[in-house]
Image: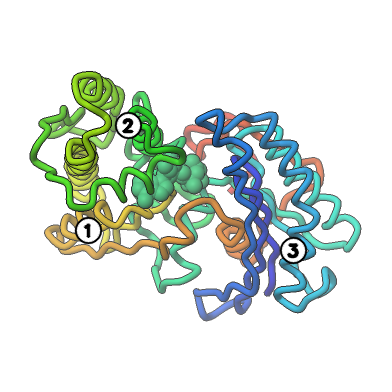
Amino acid sequence: MRVLGIETSCDETAVAIVEAPAGGDPMGRILANVVYSQLVEHRRFGGVVPEIAARAHLEHLDGLVGQALAEAGLGLGDLDAIAATGGPGLIGGVLVGVMTAKALAFAHDKPFLAINHLEGHALTVRLTEDVAFPYLLLLVSGGHCQLLTVQGPGDFTRLGTTIDDAVGECFDKTAKLLGLGFPGGPAVEAAALGGDPQRFALPRPMWRKPGCDFSFSGLKTAVRQTVEKMDRGDSRAVADLCASFQRTVGDVLADRCANALAVAPLPTLVVAGGVAANVYLRGRLEALAASHGARLVAPPVRLCTDNGAMIAWAGLERLRLGLVDGLDFRPRPRWPLDPALDPAAVNRV
Ligand code: KG4
Ligand code: ZN
């Protein structure tokens, strides 16, 4: 089975083609994975501008589809389905991806699959690793911070979520305050190397509280107040603050995951989403999982941030189960993963 996946929900225009047997071997192979990062378009605004993103997707998507097919040495007729992110995300971009996928599917008489972007992150680990359902998932990205159990495609139970900001947003804000650039996660991680993680005592919202919810706004405020009192030109202080910030985030994530493993004692903890690219945080979660007799599994770093392979793969998993979508699918700016929390989830699995 071969599926082409399109991702356009934020600032990466991405297309990939993945392949896997229809049954049997659970893992897949990436035949092509191309991405146009709109970083330069958005950098001078210090964040993603939705209208600019939508226009850039429109401009680059067709070329990237051609490039992915050429890289895989395939024609559209060799594919079994076309998948695209159907939400949640910036709606202008999602529309571009969905309309392109529908047109390709219609013109070549292939099934169309509308993929929840979060499901893409949630299932990516199964593309590269032999991970069986169910597993516990920590989904940490620029817009989301959630703990869920994953029973299968479309079958998620949310244990907790952030009551205010997402953790990736907190990384981005910290980088912006320190003048480290955008996106903030990789910049903070690089600046933290060699920094003293004990120098700044920052608040750990929700730490040691019951449940699996998160909160990051208090931490964001504390970072701002600390930056206001220090010299941003002092590279030692910047490194120490980044390291202290990262340790604090690690403390909070580990504490929340410990509670989740207590209520859902599954053998595998998966971390996914852009923030899962952070090597320090992966280490913290690995230690936490081990202390609960579980193992941590994460996608390769390059598949943590937004990409087309995650959408193609989620599409392939759905196609295996016959879960295709109609061409009347309407892109969704909001789309919770847990069907119990989704008012529109009547007909979907
Ligand atoms: O999953 P993603 O690419 O897009 C969303 O769906 O949001 O995640 C992007 C987020 C950004 O906030 C970015 O700063 C963060 O992931 N991120 C990181 C790292 N790489 C990306 N955060 C911490 N450490 C990193 N190495
Ligand atoms: Zn994402």
Determine whether, in the image, residue 6 is placed left or right of residue 261: right
Q: Can residue 54 be seen in the rendering of this structure?
A: yes
Determine whether, in the image, residue 83 is placed left or right of residue 140: right
Depth check, front residue: 148 or 11: 11
Amino acid on which disc 3 is placed: Ala
Q: Earlier in the sequence, mark 2 or mark 3?
A: 3
Horizontal and vertical percent for residue 73? Answer: 76, 78
Amino acid on which disc 2 is placed: Leu
- Image quadrant where residue 307 sits: bottom right
Front label number (2 vs 1): 2
- Name, please, the residue furthest toward the front: 233
Q: Residue at x 41, y 73 (%)?
A: 130
Amino acid on which disc 1 is placed: Gly
- Marks 2 and 1, Cα distance to the nearest angstrom? 25 Å
Q: Earlier in the sequence, mark 2 or mark 1?
A: 2
Residue carrying label 2: 178
Front label number (1 vs 3): 1
- Image quadrant where residue 233 sits: top left
- Label 3 secondary element: strand
Residue carrying label 3: 81
Horizontal and vertical percent for residue 265? Answer: 22, 55
Horizontal and vertical percent for residue 277? Answer: 38, 55
Residue carrying label 1: 283
- Label 2 secondary element: loop
Depth check, front residue: 147 or 228: 228
Depth check, front residue: 328 or 91: 91
